[in-house]
Image (spheres, helix red, strand yellow):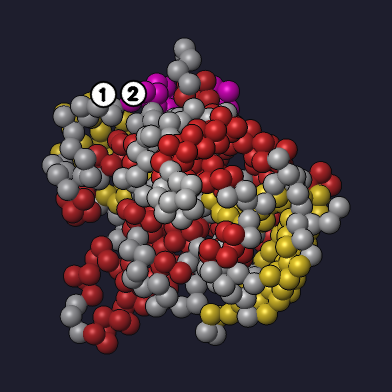
Amino acid sequence: MNPILTLDNISKRFGGVRALTDMHLKAYAGEVVALIGENGAGKSTMVKILTGIYQPDAGEIKLDGQALGFNTPLTAMRAGITAVHQEAVMFDELTVAENIYMGHHPKTAGLPRVDWARMEREAGKLFERLEVKLSPHARVKDLSIAQRHFIAIARALSQDARVVILDEPSAALSQREIQELYRIIRQLKAHGTAVIFITHKFDEIFAVADRYTVMRDGEFVGEGRVSETDEQQLISMMVGRAVTQTYPKQAAVIADTVLEVRDLSHPTEFDGISFAVRRGEILGFYGLIGAGRSEVMQALFGLTATSRGIVKLGGTTLAIHSPKDAIDSGIAYVPEDRQHQGAHLGMAIRDNVTLPQLSKFGVWLLGKRRRELALTRTYCERLELKAANFGQSVAELSGGNQQKVVLAKWLATQPKVIIIDEPTKGIDIGSKAAVHQFIGELVVQGLAVIMVSSELPEVMGLSDRIIVMYQGRIRREFSRAEATTESVAAAAMGAAA
C-alpha cells in the first residue's frame, strides 16, 4: 500500500535555530500514524509545515506521489489536509454550523449568498455520521472542550479531508470523552482518512495507532508498526536513553502543618472542604473532571470568592481576597490553563519567570537584567527547559516548555506552599520525569506541595496522602500505604467506601 502523504528530507531553520533536519513521515489511508517526540522535538513545526503556516527550507511533500507546496493554510486545506489542535480556536459568538463552514459556506444556486438552510442541514448530517448529539444552531461559547474538538473534526469532514492531524486532542477530556474520541477516530479510519495522531500518552498510542514515527531534536529517529514495539522501546527512541523511574519518590521529612483549611465553601462549585498539608509533604487531589478540585485551588489563591471557610498558614488566619494576598502570604498557584492563566505568551522567558517579584530586582537596568537572568537560569535549567535563549518569546515554545516556564515562575518566588494543577499536562515522558524529580526536591527542601492531577498513576506515585473529590465534596482521604488504583478510582466515581 502506497502512502497518501509523504514528507522527505524536510528541514527548517529559524534564524540560527535548527528546528527540523531531514525529517521523514508517511501517512496511509485508513490508518493512524502516531507522531512521537519530546517537547521541543519539532512536532509543532511539522504540523505547521503540513498545514501551510510554515514553508520548509528543504525537502519535499508529496500527496498521492505528486510533489506539492503549501504556501498558505488555504492551499493545504484545499489539498485535503487539516488539523485539530489541543487549544481549539473558534468564533465563540457564532453557531456550530457557521464555524464548521467558515471559509467555504455553501452558496444559493445562481446567487452570491450563503445558503443558511443547506449549511445547517449539512452540519446536522455530519454529526449524524459521527454519531454525536450536537445542535448546528448552538453557540460555540456554550460548549465544552470535547464538543469543540468534535466541531473541528466535523469541519475536516466538511472539506473532504484526506489527512487529519489530531494534536493532543485528549489533553482536556474526561475518560468518557476520550472513548468517544477513539470511536470517531475509528470512523475516520473506516472512511479511508489518514490520521496523524500526536500525543504524549502511551496508552493512547497503543489504543488507536497502527504505525509510529519517532523524532528527536528535529530529526527522524525511526518508524514501524505499533504492534511490533513496546513502551520502553519508544521511550528510548524518544529521549535517547531509558527512563526507568517515572515517579521517583524521594525521602522527605514530613514536619509540622503549614496550611490548614476548614469548611471552605463556594455557592455553586464546592462545599465543606477541610484538609491540612504539612511541610515536606505532597498532598494529592484526585477526582473526575467537574469534581471541583481546581475550583478549590483557585479559591485558595484568591481567584474566586468563597461563601465561608477558614484558611490558616503557619497558624495565622489569612484573609485572601486576591492573588496578591496569596502571594504575599507565601502561597503560589501553577494553573492548569498555561496559555490563558499561566504565562504571558508574548513576553520573554526571563520576563515571565520574574514577573511576580519585579520589585525585588530594583530599577537599574544592567543589574536588574543580570539578576533576572541568573534567577531564570537557575530554575529553567533545573526543569530542563528547551529554548534558544531566555530572551525567547514564550509563544515560540512548545506546550510542555511553556508549562515549565510557568512552573519556574512560581517556584522562583520560594513559596511556603505551592499548588500545582495538572503539573505534567501536555508534557512528554522524559520531561515528566524531570518535573517529578523537581517536585520531589521541593519537599526535601521543606516545601509543602498540593498537586492536582487527572493522571491516577501520577497521583499515586508522588503523593504522601490522596484526597478524592466527588461532586464538589471530599469523598475520601487515603494514606500512601492504603491507596490502590481500584479504591481511588471507585471513590472518584462516588462509590461507597
Q: Is residue 147 left or right of residue 205?
A: left
Q: Is residue 186 left or right of residue 285?
A: right
Residue 236: give x, y in percent of width and height: 73, 58
Can residue 479 be seen?
A: no
Residue 71 vertical placement versus 408 (above, below): below
Q: Residue furthest front?
A: 110
The amino acid marked with disc number 2 is Arg
In the drawing, what numbered circle is on residue 272? 1
Residue in the image at 30% along x and 35% along y = 296
Q: Is there a contact, CB below 8 Å, between mark 1 and mark 2?
A: yes
The amino acid marked with disc number 1 is Gly
Q: Which residue is mark 2?
A: 473
Residue 138: give x, y in percent of width and height: 37, 34
Residue 416: give x, y in percent of width and height: 30, 51
Between 236 and 23, which is closer to the camera in this rendering?
Answer: 23
Residue 22: give x, y in percent of width and height: 72, 75
In the drawing, what numbered circle is on residue 388? none
Q: Earlier in the sequence, mark 1 or mark 2?
A: 1
Residue 178 vertical placement versus 54 (above, below): above
Between 30 and 74, which is closer to the camera in this rendering?
Answer: 74
Image quadrant assignment for residue 59: bottom right
Residue in the image at 66% along x and 53% along y = 163
Q: Residue furthest top?
A: 496
Q: Magenta residues?
A: 468-487
Between 55 and 407, which is closer to the camera in this rendering?
Answer: 55
Q: Residue furthest right?
A: 1
Residue in the image at 28% along x and 42% along y = 298
Between 452 and 67, which is closer to the camera in this rendering?
Answer: 67
In space, the residues marked 1 and 2 are separated at their CA atoms by: 7 Å
Is residue 481 a member of the stretch shown in magenta? yes
